Amino acid sequence: MKRPAPTRAPLLLTVPALLAIAFLLLPLAGILLRTDWARLGGDLTDPAVVQALRLSLYVSCWALGLSLVLGIPLAWLLARVPFRGKALVRSLVLLPMVLPPTVGGVALLLGLGRRGVAGPWLEETFGIVLPFHTSGAVVAATFVAMPFLVISLEGALRGLRPRYEETAASLGASPVRVFLTVTLPMVAPGLIAGAALTWARALGEFGATITFAGNLPGATQTLPLQVYLLLQEDPEAATAVSLLLLVIAMAVLVALRGRWTPRGGEPRPRRDPAPEPAAQEPAAQEPAAPEPTAPETLVPTLTAPTSLHADLTGFTRLTLTADPGTTLAVVGPNGAGKTTLLRALLGLTPRAHARLRLGDDPVTHLPPHRRGVAWVPQDGALFPHLTALGNTAYGPRAQGVPRAEARRRAQEWLDRLGVGTLAHRRPAQLSGGQAQRVALARALAARPRLLLLDEPLAALDQTTRARVRHTLRAHLADFAGVCLIVTHDPVEALSLADRVLVLDGGRVLQDAPPAEVTRHPRSPWVARMLGRNAWAGTATGAGLLLPGGGALTAAEPLPLPEGTPALAVIPPEAVSVHRERPGGSPRNVWRGTVREITASGSRMRVLITSPRIPDLVAETTPQAVAELGLTDGAEVWTAVKATEVSLTPL
């Protein structure tokens, strides 16, 4: 296959671009051309240069350490916490990057010098004097270099979806544990890039150092200051030291370009997931995730039958009660408030507030990691730096379970969901269906009192979905807590749930057993999800008045005042299709046009439009479609018996 010819750059842009490259290269070329290569070794091993180099490494490493200690929390604050004055704080972070270094040095002198704002207090209280001391050089380097770390890490944190951290919290991990075991590992490339830039900037700092800390050999005279002195005494030696600094800076940039940032703006290649092996194989051991230093508060897990009572206010307004062992399917159109309901039960959204009681325990005041509520988001949110086994063992480990027991429990759940042989693989090596099963195993291994599943089977193929649905149903049958499943799949809702909760606009339209919802859906969306024709209109003495001016006759009209909003549900198999106007008993007969014919298993679904009624779907056999000669655009007659029409008030 021929590659497309590369786009030719316009001359108007190419010439200035080449001039810019030449402008940047010329000073570097000057250093290379003017270096006296014969005396390079002697210049770089001169005792004064070696002393300045050691001091520069000492100062830059301490500046990096201070930047990490202070900059990581600051970057997290800017990326994750909304507060007043955030724009001002971010401007303060950026200020040292745009401020002339000498001005920064003057500012440090006036703030931390012996006669500065805080200098006398530091000297009297702690005996610390920063100017003309190595510690002053460290402070000056930190002041000008730390913004590189903060900005780089803040960008990485902003690019990290909070769903990973929220999922970790729902598994019982405290905020400290989440930060150490999920947040930092996932933003490691941005952190390392920022740290490298910070160290390189601190190594090359000159203006703030000489203004605030002075130029004392062995104390504050770093390598850049040594270059300044050598320019006056020995220009050739200054060129050699400049070349050393140039090589160090270039090495840092090459390392960042080649390893810690994507090349050419393209995403890094992802390995194709291998097919699942048929036979079991032992899971490979993985490196231990970093453990938090703070002690963990044990999370309440499911040890006894647990009921649910929740009062929600805000966007989603409802009262929800469920006995132990109940599974509720939450259905509704997009924007109905389904995910908001789950996030409110977790305590993760300001859009709705839930007063939540699990069993006899009120948990409204508890943070998400102490509620005993596990969540499986739509995309699974597997931690990419952990294997499938590490992901699944994460909840038990966060709850204080010993490592061996946590891994045993995790392997057991992976085996039950048919992905035990993939325990050693990372999420990038799993297919979408495999990853979703691992996410489900991870939630179940945490033994929550309330289990929240946001479309848990959406990524699975039909065969795998049926198998996992059967496994999930078997587990839920023995589950002593309460489970909420958000789904758009009617099979999931009907086969897994004891009750179906229908939401629209944050309000409950129906809360009933699956059989009742199937027979009498009170939402057009649910009726269509179940494959029915759903027409909204107003009640009449004979049936329903439709918005287009048509009428629908029902055998059992609603005993409601005329004009009351109502919903008519017509099964597709109750719609008969004819090429001529039918005679006989049908009370509802309309003329229409075939717009679409699709296969649904062994049946055919025919979409028919008419000017006086909403779109109507008829279900028939392939033989009937052939005999009637139905094609797109064919003129037909449709008929529905009044006994087949089911009316429900809205």
Image: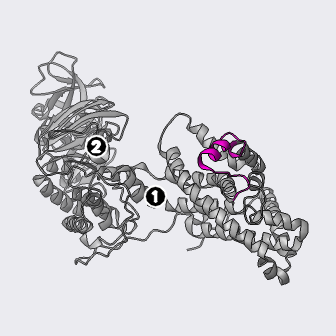
28 versus 67 height, above or below:
below
Q: Secondary structure at mark 1?
A: helix
**Res. 618 mark:** none
Residue drawn at point x = 32 percent, y = 39 percent? 340
Residue 339 in picture, x, y percent from top left: 32, 42
Residue 294 in picture, x, y percent from top left: 36, 54
562 versus 63 height, above or below:
above
567 versus 331 height, above or below:
above
Q: Is residue 165 visible?
A: yes
Q: Which residue is mark 1?
A: 184
Q: Nearer the viewer, residue 521 or 426?
A: 426
Residue 129 located within the stretch drawn in magenta:
yes
**Is residue 533 rendered to the left or right of residue 192?**
left
Q: Which residues are magenta?
A: 111-133
Q: Which residue is mark 2?
A: 607
Closer to the chain start, of discs 1 and 2, is 1
The kind of residue tagged 1 is: Leu
Q: Nearer the viewer, residue 69 or 145?
A: 69
The kind of residue tagged 2 is: Leu
Q: Secondary structure at mark 2?
A: strand
Q: Residues within 10 Å of mark 2 (few under 14, many from 20)?
A: some
The N terminus sits in image quarter: bottom right
Distance (Cα) linking label 1 and label 2: 53 Å
Residue 357 in picture, x, y percent from top left: 20, 37
Q: Nearer the viewer, residue 174 or 19?
A: 174
**Is residue 375 rendered to the left or right of residue 130?**
left
Quarter of the image holding residue 278? bottom left
**Is residue 482 rendered to the left or right of residue 160?**
left
Residue 384 located within the stretch drawn in magenta:
no
